[in-house]
Amino acid sequence: MRPRTSNSRQTSHYSPRFAGKKRTPAKRSTQEIHASRFINKAIASVDEIPYTPTHSFNDFGLNPQTIATLGHIGYETPSPIQDQTIKPGLAGKDVIGLANTGTGKTAAFLLPIIDALATSRTVQGALVLAPTRELAQQINDEFRRFSAGQKLYSALVVGGVNMSRQIREVQRGPHLIVGTPGRINDLIDRNILRLASCTTFVLDEADRMCDMGFVRDIRKIESELPRKRQTFCFSATMTTDVKAIVEEFMHDPVTVSVIKNETNDHIEQDVIHARDKAHKIELLLGLLRKDGFDKVIVFCDTKHFAQRLSDRLSKEGFTSEAIHGNKSQGQRDRALRAFKSGGVRILVATDVAARGLDIPNVSHVINFDAPKQYEDYVHRIGRTGRAGQSGQALTFVSQPGISAPKSLTARHHERPNRSHSVRTEPTQNTKPSHRRRLTGGAAAEDRLVRLIDTL
């Protein structure tokens, strides 16, 4: 892809985007259901034979430099999604990949792209769209890792960071651009980015992008691409919006799937009951003091409380960082690096971090606030149990009004044959008057944290 020059033809059939205007998320249609029912749905298996890879990376005909790089970084056998995607990808076919996170799907589309960019005269550039800055950053890092020594260049184009450097990178004429839909459209509208030479288009986590309200942006970007191109579309679910995009953007696609059930087989799932938010903090502290909670992601509903909870954990002697929308991109990157390297043991996050983050060896995911939607539950707990490792996902639920089974434990496709609950007894420090006051918004959360600090 090459940058637009000053005399490039400007498009006039799209209205300019307004900087700073808040995006309205797409309305969700999924019914809100109780966390224990999330677990039942998540482990519901289908009757299919598990796919066993039949190739080595040498069998695909990848160029020797790519093969050498894969060997150097320890890639020996392709994962199921890679085994099914790389061959049609190298053949130039459109590919629909149905895969959960942690299955190796990034390499599944990057390896054919790298091979084509390095060896083909007809493939001039590639564009990868991702729903979040974090996922886009990871894809860009993986591209640079897999393409080492092949003189291929990439540019990361995401919101939340200074645009000047990104403009300079685009103007260098990178072989690959990885970005989020909003910032890509910004550069198109500013007459900086031209996609006429982009011959490969990737939608990664298409269902999430649609869910976040990016459908119009995606369609606008697609209209800037040449009609003759290769398209990859990866998604964990085939929603109505994703189906529409597939039908509109793709030509005779090959569909590959490695989804046996909604969540990874290696994740043990359970719920823990608590009286109120104060009790949740008490229970959380007890869990984090136990052996085995080595690398933990804690999810909260709000940015404000995520930061407060992280500060509280730090005061209790735990190494903790928070990642949420009020953090700058630099702050988020530093927190993620510290968590990945082991310098920080606990990452407290809102759903901004629930999708796309590939952090190795996460032992536990704790939903401090139960997600409202089933898709969010699946995306959150997918941060553990990756790359064949085992993990545990725990969800706190408030005791009042619960009518579903009190606790469910799930592992390896097996439905639980009995239920058990983590029973909690009231303590003398718990005062109903405090619980009545601690409701409603950030001010209430401030009071809650001050109350907990005194316990």
Image: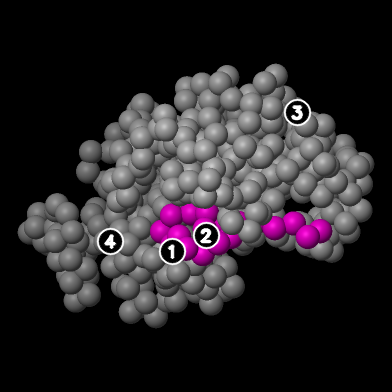
Does the segment drawn in magenta span residue 387?
Answer: no
Residue located 21% across and 68% down the image: 449
Point out the tag, 2 or 4, that comes first from the N-terminus. 2
Q: Are marks 1 and 2 in contact (CB under 8 Å)?
A: yes
Q: Secondary structure at mark 2?
A: helix
Q: Secondary structure at mark 1?
A: loop
Comparing marks 2 and 3, which lies closer to the viewer? 2
Q: CA distance from mark 2 to mark 3?
A: 30 Å
Give the residue type that dot 2 points to: Gln
In-image side of 328 versus 207 (left or right): left
Q: CA distance from mark 2 to mark 4?
A: 32 Å
Which quadrant of the figure has residue 148? bottom right
Point out the tag, 3 or 4, that comes first from the N-terminus. 3
Q: CA distance from mark 1 to mark 2?
A: 7 Å
Give the residue type that dot 1 points to: Asn
Image coords of residue 235 (percent x, y) = 57, 35
Point out the tag, 1 or 3, that comes first from the N-terminus. 3
Residue located 36% across and 72% down the image: 313
Q: Secondary structure at mark 3?
A: loop
The tag on residue 93 is 3
The tag on residue 166 is 2
Q: Are marks 2 and 3 in contact (CB under 8 Å)?
A: no
Residue 293 in sight in this render? no
Residue 195 in sight in this render? yes
Few, some or many C-alpha atoms within 10 Å of disc 1 (few <14, some 14-19, many ≥20)? few
Give the residue type that dot 3 points to: Lys
Does the segment drawn in magenta span residue 151?
Answer: yes
Residue interval drawn in magenta: 150-169
